[in-house]
Amino acid sequence: MHFPAALPLQSGKSIRGYDLSFETYGALNADHSNAVLVCHALNASHHVAGVYAGQANSEGWWDNMIGPGKPVDTGRFFVIGVNNLGSCFGSTGPMQINPDTGRVYGADFPVVTVEDWVDAQARLLDVLGIRSLAAVLGGSLGGMQALSWTLQYPDRVRHAVVVASAPNLTAGNIAFNEVARRAIVTDPDFHAGHFYEHGVTPKRGLRIARMIGHITYLSNDVMNEKFGRQLKRAVEDATRGEVAAYQFSTQKIEFQIESYLRYQGDKFAEYFDANTYLLITRALDYFDPARHFGGNLSQALARATAKFLLISFSTDWRFTPGRSREIVKALLDNRRDLSYAEIDAPHGHDAFLLDDARYMGVMRSYFSGIAQEFSA
């Protein structure tokens, strides 16, 4: 969808003539009361569920959660997935043409925040004729957007589902993001963010950024269980029925975990935009609804009127359960209606994308309750 009017941004700048890519699933009911907005995390998109006809490996990133008969049942809900401004999957971002200059935005794309994304999503819903959301749902950075919806548009959200998220980033999380950004901007092919004009991509920096990020998404237990200290060459030699002397090396891939991380980095560098990575991680860093309230989260969340479901995972050390409990406490301070589930799962931050039966059960039960509100 194209939006010719300028969107004011938190930075004081604005962006005009922009596009938002989105997908919808299910059908909007007569009074438009069954809409669910899904907000995506760092490297995801508007393609939330289902597959594209004729395209292999095109499954939506939350397909296990959303669809007919699934926890967020598209037989009952009208689900909307939106690709955020600044992303590289169809919505206007650094790879597109700046209508004011006629040149690719590149590093000149304006800084965007979680609040800016929510404002853009609200404009899209206006055009779709959706005044009120049955629920806004997101995990990780998507959970921050869901939380921000309840503060920016409290009268438009009946339920907010915030999964594996936090009210802001810790210094440690900001540090991980900064190391990843430095890997990108110091890549010789970055060219101060205008690498498109040079016909190159800072793939080395993107690979390292993804490897750093991926380490933080997995728990130590999962890494040990999947890879341990297995040597890649030892596994290959055993497969061939050979016994080879191990040769120490500082350059070769020797451990299975090294091979896995390099594979993830290589794959990421082929499809993700470097400037988008910088923009989105900065949006993560900047998000802090309590900053205008002297750091008092309870005061910040006083504006929220929605009902909440918060979910955290025991081994998630990127967004620990303690961060979710901060939100829970702030909501309880304001006597808000909320449910909280802390799932004992071994998968780390990635658990919010996986098929843990307890997690899926909580989501199914909660959304069944929402559906009863507009089905009665």
Image (spheres, helix red, strand yellow):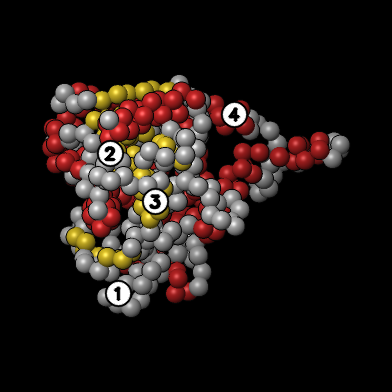
Residue where numbered disc 2 is placed = 134
- Residue sitting nearer the eye, 187 or 4: 4
User: Which of the two labelled residues, at mark 1 and mark 4, occupies the earlier sequence position?
Assistant: 1
| Amino acid type of the residue that numbered disc 1 sits on in the rendered structure | Pro
Residue drawn 36% across the image and 23% down it: 341
Distance between the alpha carbons at the discs numbered 1 and 3: 28 Å
User: Which of the two labelled residues, at mark 1 and mark 2, occupies the earlier sequence position?
Assistant: 1
| Amino acid type of the residue that numbered disc 3 sits on in the rendered structure | Thr
From the image, state whether disc 4 or disc 3 is nearer to you: 3
Q: Is mark 2 on a helix, strand or loop?
A: loop
Distance between the alpha carbons at the discs numbered 1 and 4: 50 Å
Q: What element carries label 1?
A: loop
Q: Residue 24 carries which label?
A: 3
Residue 210 appears in view: yes
Residue 39 appears in view: no
- Residue sitting nearer the eye, 204 or 31: 31
User: Which of the two labelled residues, at mark 2 and mark 3, occupies the earlier sequence position?
Assistant: 3
Residue 70 in picture, x, y percent from top left: 46, 35
Q: What element carries label 3?
A: strand
Residue where numbered disc 4 is placed = 224
| Label 3 packing within 10 angstroms: few (<14), some (14-19), many (20+) | some
User: Which of the two labelled residues, at mark 4 and mark 2, occupies the earlier sequence position?
Assistant: 2
Q: Which mark is residue 86?
A: none
Distance between the alpha carbons at the discs numbered 1 and 2: 36 Å
Q: Is residue 3 above or below residue 150?
A: below
Disc 1, disc 4: CB below 8 Å? no
User: Which of the two labelled residues, at mark 1 and mark 3, occupies the earlier sequence position?
Assistant: 3
**As drawn, is 56 to the left or to the right of 19?**
right
Q: Is residue 18 above or below residue 178?
A: below
**As drawn, is 282 to the left or to the right of 55?**
left
